Structures are given as C-alpha cells and as structure tokens.
Amino acid sequence: MSRRTLKLGAVLLGVGGPGQHRTWLDPEIPADASVDIDWYLARAEEAEAAKFDLVFIVDSQFITENSPNHYLSRLEPLTLLSALAVHTRHIGLVGTATTSYNEPFNLARRLYSLDHISGGRAGWNVVTSGDAGTAGNYSRDEHYDYATRYGRALEHVRVAQGLWDSYEADAFPRDRATEVFLDPAKQHALNHKGEHFSVVGPLNLERSPQGQPVIFQAGDSEEGRDLGASIAEVIFTHAQTLEQAKAFRTELRERAAAKGRDPEHVLILPGIRLVIADTDEEARAKEDALLGGRSFDRALKELGRPFGWHDFTQYELDAPFPDVASLGERSFRTQAEGITKLAKDNGFTLRQLVEHLSESARSPFVGSPTTVADTIQHWFEEGGFDGINVTVNAPSEFARFTDQVLPILRERGVVRSEYESTTLRGNLGLPIPENRHTAARRPQPEPALVP
Amino acid sequence: MSRRTLKLGAVLLGVGGPGQHRTWLDPEIPADASVDIDWYLARAEEAEAAKFDLVFIVDSQFITENSPNHYLSRLEPLTLLSALAVHTRHIGLVGTATTSYNEPFNLARRLYSLDHISGGRAGWNVVTSGDAGTAGNYSRDEHYDYATRYGRALEHVRVAQGLWDSYEADAFPRDRATEVFLDPAKQHALNHKGEHFSVVGPLNLERSPQGQPVIFQAGDSEEGRDLGASIAEVIFTHAQTLEQAKAFRTELRERAAAKGRDPEHVLILPGIRLVIADTDEEARAKEDALLGGRSFDRALKELGRPFGWHDFTQYELDAPFPDVASLGERSFRTQAEGITKLAKDNGFTLRQLVEHLSESARSPFVGSPTTVADTIQHWFEEGGFDGINVTVNAPSEFARFTDQVLPILRERGVVRSEYESTTLRGNLGLPIPENRHTAARRPQPEPALVP
C-alpha cells in the first residue's frame, strides 16, 4: 500500500476566526456570495484543480441579529452541493445537516440522491442544532436538551445507514431478456424501532458507487467525542498547538478502537487558518492587521453565542467574568464551560477574557509558502492530523495555498498529484462498507482447527 | 398584452397509463434511468430547446412490491432539480414534495434555495402523501386522515409563503462604503402559530428573482379542488373528453374567483398522453399495441393502490366488484370512491371493471402530427386547458412531439418561439407576488372623492 497522503478539505465561505463578519467587505468576494451559485461553482472547480479531497458547506437553521452576515441569507447545503456535483468529477461534496430537526428517511434519501448524482462523492457532516431558538422554527416549544440531542444524533445516523443498505448491490438485475427488474430477496425493510425514531423502510434508492456516504462529525464535548468515536470516519476539530492536536487525535483513535473500530478509518482533519505572504515577516504583519480589524464590541456580542446568545453587554467590563456557564446547557455547552473555566483559572475580567480570546486566535500556520508547508508537513508527520480543512473566501488567498504551498508539499510526496478514485471514500482511503444483508448471507468461515 | 400561448410541461420519466411498468424494457431508455442524472440532464436540455415552460418530477416516499419499477429506486426531486438548474437557463423546475412528512421550514428553505440557484425557476408541486404506509417511514403509528392531510397542506403552504417573505427586496444594502450589510427593518419574523405548525422564522434566505416559487397542485376530491382554488397557480389534472376538461377548468376558475383570486392566475394543465405516428391509422395501431402490452394480473394488482394497496386477487373475478371504498379513507379516497361508483353504476364484475379501466385509458391525442396539433389547438381554444403536460420517456417519442407537432403549433402562434423571461413566473405569465411587508408599508391610496 502506498503511503497515505495528507487529506485536503475546502470550507467554502467559511466563517470563524477574527474578522469573519468583515469577509463581505473584501472586494474580491461578491457581497452576496452566500447565495451566488456561480461563486460556489468557481471555488469548487479551483479546489478540484488543486486535487482537494472535498468541499465542505457549513449550516444552521436559525438566525439572530448577531449571526455572521453570510448566515443571514444562504443556500441550503445539500441543494447547493447537488449543483456542484454536475460541474465536478472527483472532489467530495460534504454537507452539514442537523439530526435535531430532520426526519431520518428524508435526510438519508437526500444524501443518497446526492451520492448517486455525484457518482459516489457525498459526505454528511452530522451535527446537532446548538442554537436553542432553532426549536421555534420546528413547531417545538423547547429545544432538545443535550443528552437528547446526542441520543437522536447517534440513532439518526444508524437509521440512515440502515436505510442505505435497503438494496444489496445486485438487487436490480434489470434484465430485459427475462423481464426481471428487481430481485425481491435483495430488497430489505429496516423495521427500526428506537427511542427517538421508528422507520420501516426500505429506502427507495439502490446502492451507490461508494455504498454509503462518508460520515463527518465535529464536537469537543464528552458526548461529541463519544459520538465521533462511534460513527465518524472524518472528524473536524480545531488545534492551537501540535501537542493539543496529537492528544486529540490519539484520544479519538483510542476511543474508536475501544468501540471495535479500526482507527485507520477515523481521519482527523482540523480546520486551520492560513496566513501566507511572500516572507514570514509580511505574513505576521498580515495577521496583525486581520486581528486588529475585529472590534471589541463585536467580539463581546459574539461571545454570547455558546451561552444561548446571552447578552454580555449588560455586565461591567472590568468586573470578574460572570458565571453563566449553565446558560450553555441547551446551546454549546462545552464551549461555554471551557470559556468560563479559562476566565476563572486566570482570574480574568470580562474585558480581559474578550481580549485574551481575540489574541489567542493567532494561527500556527502563518508565514512564507515554505514556512507554512514545513509546518503542515511537520504536524502531519508528527501525528497531529490526517489532513486539514482550509477556509476558502478570497480566491487570491486560496491561490496562495494552491499555487505556492501545495506544489512544495506535492514535490515532497505529502499531498497527491492525481486523484486515486472517483469516489470520496476512494480518495480518503476509506473502505466501502459491505451491505449488512450481503454480509449476513456470506458463509461464515470454518472455525480454525487447533493443531 | 400579447395573446397567451399554450403552456408546456414535460414530466420526466412519467408513469401512469397503460404499459407504465414496461417503460424500462424500452431499449431507448436506460433501465436505470430513474437514478441516471445524465438521462435527466439530456431530457431537460431537449425540453428547453423546444421552449417548454417546465420539467416536472413526480415523487413518493413509500414503496411496496407493486410500485412501478422506476419508483423502487429514484432520485429525490429537489436534489435532482438543483443539478438540472445549473445546466439550463430558462426552463422551469417543478418538484413534488409532500406536506404530510416535511417540516415547513426545511421545505421552504430547500425550494427557495432551488429558486436562487436557478435564478427564479422553481415550482413546488404541493401534495399530501396518499400511501398510508408512508407513516411508518416517519415514526408515526398511523397515517394522517384525509381532513388532517389537507389541513396540513394548506397551512404548510401558507407558512412557506410567509417564510419566503422574510426579507423585503431591498433588505440587504450590502453597502461596503457605509459597511451596512442588512437593513434590519426589512427582515421579518413570521411568528406563525397554527393548528398544525408553529414557526417563528425568519427564513435565512433573501428574496429571489421571482419572489416566490410557483405553486402547483393536483387533486380531484372536494378537498383537493378547494385546496387548488386556494393556493394553486398551476393545477394538474386528467381529461378524457373536451367537455370534462372545460367543466373542470370552469369550476376551478370559479372556485378561485370566489376566494378573491384572479382566475387568470390559475392555469389548468392536464397531463395528456400522446400517441403520434406518421398517419392516424398507424397511431391508432400503436396505441392498440400499447394497451395490449399491459397484463391483466398487473392491472389487478395496481387497482389496489387507491384502496391502500388492497389485495384484489383474493376476490372472485366474475363476482360483483367488492364494496371496499372505505379502505381509501387514509389513502386515495376520491379515486377509490370513483372506481367503486363506476363499478356499481354499471353493474361491473371485478374482471369487467379492470378491463373497462384498461380500455378507457385510450387517449384523445392519438394521430398524425397534424391531427394531434389540431386536437391540442382545438381543446386549447375551446377552453379545455391553458397548457399540457406530456410524459417524456423514450427520446424518439418526445422528438415526435417537439420536432413534428410543435412546429405546426408554433407556426399557428399557439406556442412560443422564444422564452419571454428567465423566470418561471415570467414564462407562465404569472405575476410576481408583492412582499407582504413591503405592501403593508406602502401608503394607502386616498379614498376617491365622490363628485
């Protein structure tokens, strides 16, 4: 087997990091890029030309006045990805879809339709809805609590995977001579009855070229890590230092192994923020300018999101950080608790906390093309990650990575020169899961004779 | 205003009519056409070249062993249409989506995303799920009863339309000079609380080029006609005679007018089955062969669908038709009742009923290109319909219509020579609905002075 290469994900119109609310001011990006299909098509074609494994679309179903600008009006991910599918040939198409407010039958069907339309390039970023207000868009008085959200997520994925196995690979002979369209013995109802869902099936879609869409997941909480170890084939995360990255990857691989999975089939891809310039000094100056562009008031408002959009402007800036971590219970609990602990451990005031968070947003991947290539290769070879996700906003910034950094890594054999496959599984080096019903029919091997 | 032309819809991989289960045997059609995106792309491009108003995708979410072959494995309509959107420029994209088992927020968002991706060409065929077994795929013990299904449908559409008005046309100044992205006064929550749904909003998508996707609907029952008169801008139906067609169109226009709507904005498009050959005799022989191709056993099984997939093989074929119309209550009630009444009025046995239904499937649109063009023009000018839906299966059969019949109608000014618009509303001659919030803000006209 050839050496595994670094996997590459492109987060189209990514948000996060300092200055995210100012992205639309960049004259290189259409101000309405989030609803501009031509913008997405052009970026997907560029990412494919650079042999990226996948494009990735984030999502949410609830907006407030403090939502990042591009969230206020944007295309639904799977609808968007289907349009990208017919203008690309190799790149994976990964969409975010919530398990909190979708029916498994509908979502499994849409993801599998995308998998067929793309010839086996679909991926599903499995999320639970973190904004409590989302409930109001779905005829519910109250958002699901944390445990329910994660329970639904696990069961939802299992149901979807069961539905994707509705037909064995050879279920449709479609033999015109004998006039046999379907072999009914290879069509399987699911008959799932669980705590959150009951789904009879079968799904009305045959087996796709990669068998099952690839499962992506992120989530740092105990529940999130447990879910990732159970179901995820690719895990998104963040990494501030190589040590943190290695520790996270080691832990997730061990957790997956403890669940009987092969850790080689769990890829860790942190989102990394690239700041590339001709020289290291210029790159550092560029990051300073980016960090300086973020207003304190904006940062203070955005701090509220993990706490259920709590309004922190009501507090005295120079008093100790208020203990409102419990407000994260129905929102982004782990993040809220982490921020609160950070403030408490350091004795931060509210102002100091906001300033510290802004400052610690500095990226380890800042420098000249060679410096950035060196850092990425070092982290990869040291076991910090199996691949990276980079945000694609301004095309010229993306081109710095594809045209200046990737050729160095390609020369060194760290990234691919050509796609290995036309499916997402094939390019990621992930196995095609055997259909469960085909597996059940396979004769069991004889027990080995003890000599 | 120029004379209104005949509207043209293309039902891609349509089913219905005799021989539907044998479609896949046609060597001109890939046996797996229902999952072949290239097949759909080619047909959509042909329909657009022929200046059709729209392509139309049927759907269901529940299959049994008796489902038509292409239903056993097919692409989800909106996912499919998004792929077609980026390979076409003018043709409308109409997808079937059920109000019974979708959340209004999710469906409104997907339809509006398609509307944006296509530049204003989305249409929604509003249906309620007729197959009672569908409930089992959505964690429900029992299917919704008839009244609930239609109540949900009406409310679902109203919620979706409310969500589509979340942003007024000028809600996003996106002015880089002043750094104003959104005008919050032009963003509107919905705050809907109804019998079936409660949805806060706003939807996270700005106004589309045609303002709102076009609403399509079909349904012959009292509830179906009432729903159509309330919400539909295009109504699909069937028509066996010109008199029936005129009566249906007149009734629906009157019903719409009684609800305060302009009947000119309610278009009636029956699905018509074309059988075209070089001469009238050859066309009649072609239809005979088609009708003969349907087996009695198959027809007997398919008879069960409106009765909730009731098994009619258990009855004596030469005994009077059994009175099991009540089985349609949670399925296709009107159709089940109509069939039962037909059998009773004529004193049919089960065998006679099946044979009668097969025979009465004969089309009024059979003949040479000139004969078919004459018939279509006659029905159109007599007020039988505003347009027609034709099924597109074998490309050579579709070409007979586009290359032999349409040029005659175009020469006579019955159909368009060029698209009038890039939006579906524009081509159908339907108005762009004013955003309700913009309308509410508009100053009311002064009361007229009585002289």
Image (spheres, coloured by chain):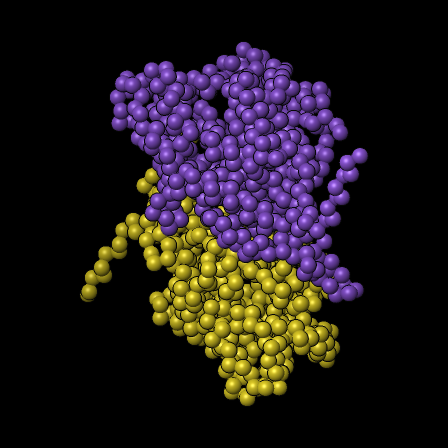
Chain colours: A purple, B yellow
Q: Which residue is rendered at x = 46% and y = 48% of the image?
A: A196
Q: Which residue is rendered at x = 40% and y = 17% of the image?
A: A356
Q: What percent of the width, then of the height, locates residue A33?
A: 50, 37
Q: What percent of the width, then of the height, locates residue A67?
A: 40, 35
Q: Is residue B341 above or below residue A315?
A: below
Tell whether A425 sits left or right of A199: right
Q: What percent of the width, then of the height, locates residue A120?
A: 66, 44
Q: Looking at the image, which is closer to me, A341 or A37?
A: A341
Q: Is residue A127 above or below residue A400?
A: below
Looking at this view, name the residue that lies furthest to the top: A281
Q: Looking at the image, which is closer to me, A362 or A80?
A: A362
Q: Which residue is rendered at x = 66% and y = 51% of the image?
A: A437
Q: Which residue is rendered at x = 55% and y = 72% of the image?
A: B310
Q: Looking at the image, which is closer to me, B228 or A219?
A: A219
On the image, which quarter does residue A60 sit in? Answer: top left
Looking at this view, name the residue that lies furthest to the bottom: B347
Can the viewer see residue B187?
yes
